[in-house]
Amino acid sequence: MLLGLDGQGPRYAQITRALVALIRRGALAPGSRAPATRELARDLGCSRNVVLMAYEQLVLEGYFEPRERAGTFVALDLPQVHPELGTGVRTGAGPGRLKAPLSARGRVVVRAAREAMAAIPRRPGCAIDFIYGLSEPDDRLLRELRRALSRPLRDRAFSYGHAAGDSALREQISLRLRTARGIARPSDQIVLTSGTQQALDICARLLLGPGDRAIVEDPGYEVAAAAFLAAGARVHHVGVDRDGLDPARLPTGRHPARLVYVTPSHQFPTGAVLPAARRYALLAWARRARAYVFEDDYDGEFRFAGQPIPALAGLDPEVVLYCGTFAKSLFPSCRLGYLVLPPALVEPALRCKWLADRGSSRLVESALAELFAAGHYDRHVRRMLRRYRARRDALVRSLRQHLGGDAEIEGSSAGLHLVAWLKALHPDRVGDLVTACRQRGVGVYPLAPHAARPPKRAALLLGYGLVDVSDIERGVCRLAAAYRQVRNSCRGHEPVEKL
């Protein structure tokens, strides 16, 4: 017998998979004798011991059964398969692939996640990539993190922690929020989460039910809208302007909303900063509407102009749920964030967190607490702030030099990205510009995927978390060349610029 081996992994494992495939296709029927091991080894050009290892594995998995003094046979109790279905599909429902019987809520969750994932930027593999939402790993911090991981590996890695998270880290976060963000909350009102997404999911589960209204910014963070939709809520998009969300545009009435999601310190994606008057108006609206405000401070550590802006949570601790993350200040794969909650929501959030995952990684939490206590985290943030400011300055300078008045720059006072509004380009041609840039080895990203309503102006999101200063001007120069090519083609001209 000749088997078609896939070439992946050890030879005995390839033989095992090939024989399973024959059984599932019906080529080896239940109760039939298995091929002789010596003959199969000769046909495959391998040692008989290799074939014997495969047979032992098949006996363990229940596909083969040895019979004393008779040999090895295909197990009799295997389910019948249809010869046309291929591997792994049982008969009984007729030919074709069986579909998972999702519930109505399950279909809503899948649809919401699919739509949100479509807006997440895909890296094109360009030499110069202005990807946003990612930060640069720092060698000095990584060395300190390796040292900090050694202690919890010895004494904390092999037991469950409290659902709220490491007490030392929560205390450090409480101290930092008090001085840096104006939030005076005790550590027992802080719950550590597996990033912003889990914080959103917890709040959606606790506060939103089928038919409840949730408000999000437009353009905005589509994952927030997806979390609220998955909870069965009706999502209402409110447009933002140069000053962020306008509370005067929020719905009123008997049941205006249960929850409103905002990014007031650096609106995503436009970068707008919510001014004081709107902050107080938003909180007053929430009080009247008996609604909660979810404040997402996703990149609050990096501010380049003026003093840090006090958080909404510092103005009204009863109404605001404050969310922070270490995805930008450290790196996304640490999967650690935190929720600062009003007292009435702490216990429900702990129950919800415990039910979801029993608690975030004790290993990462303990190591990060040590980085905080030793001052390494603050030194790292100051170091990265200088690095990102230099890149931000280089990007703004290059955009003004190569695009001049055609580019209006917004959102550059904080964070790891800015918005370039392109005055002379129709919004429908942004996709052509993105393609033209990638042909020149430059990755740029449209703002439109983050908007519920098509933007009336063309805009690019340009991140500088992963691009060196030395590459920024070359990248913007190529962006400007692509921009002129697309703009001229819109006017009926042939492209005149090449690499």
Image (cartoon, helix red, strand yellow):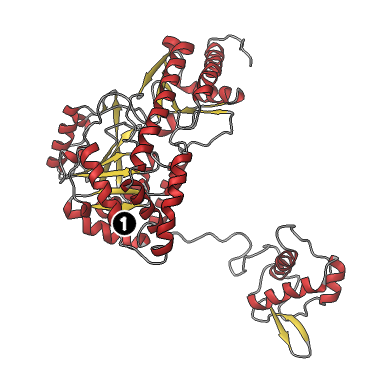
Residue 489 visible to the viewer: yes
Q: Residue 200 at what x, y percent from top left?
A: 32, 48
Q: Is 237 positioned to the left or the right of 482 in the image?
A: left
Q: Residue 463 at what x, y percent from top left?
A: 45, 29
Q: Which of 432 and 242 is in front in this view?
A: 242
Dot 1 falls on a residue whose secondary structure is: loop
Q: In which quarter of the image is residue 348?
A: bottom left
Q: Is 210 positioned to the left or the right of 125 in the image?
A: left
In the rendered image, the quadrant that contains the C terminus is top right
Up-down: is 233 above or below 462? Answer: below
In the rendered image, the quadrant that contains the N terminus is bottom right
Q: Residues within 10 Å of mark 1 (few under 14, many from 20)?
A: many
Q: Residue 83 at what x, y percent from top left?
A: 71, 66
Q: Which of 217 and 13 is in front in this view?
A: 13
Q: Which of 338 and 424 is in front in this view?
A: 338
Up-down: is 239 above or below 289? Answer: above
Residue 114 visible to the viewer: no
Q: Quadrant of residue 353?
A: bottom left
Task: Tell me which residue sits at (87%, 70%) in the image.
Answer: 42
Up-down: is 284 above or below 109? Answer: above
Q: Residue 280 at what x, y percent from top left?
A: 15, 33
The residue type indicated by label 1 comes to Asp
Count numbered badges in the picture. Answer: 1
List the residue tagged with mark 1. Answer: 166
In the current view of this chain or complex, which residue is farthest to the bottom? 69
Q: Is 291 positioned to the left or the right of 456 in the image?
A: left
Q: Nearer the viewer, residue 29 or 207?
A: 207
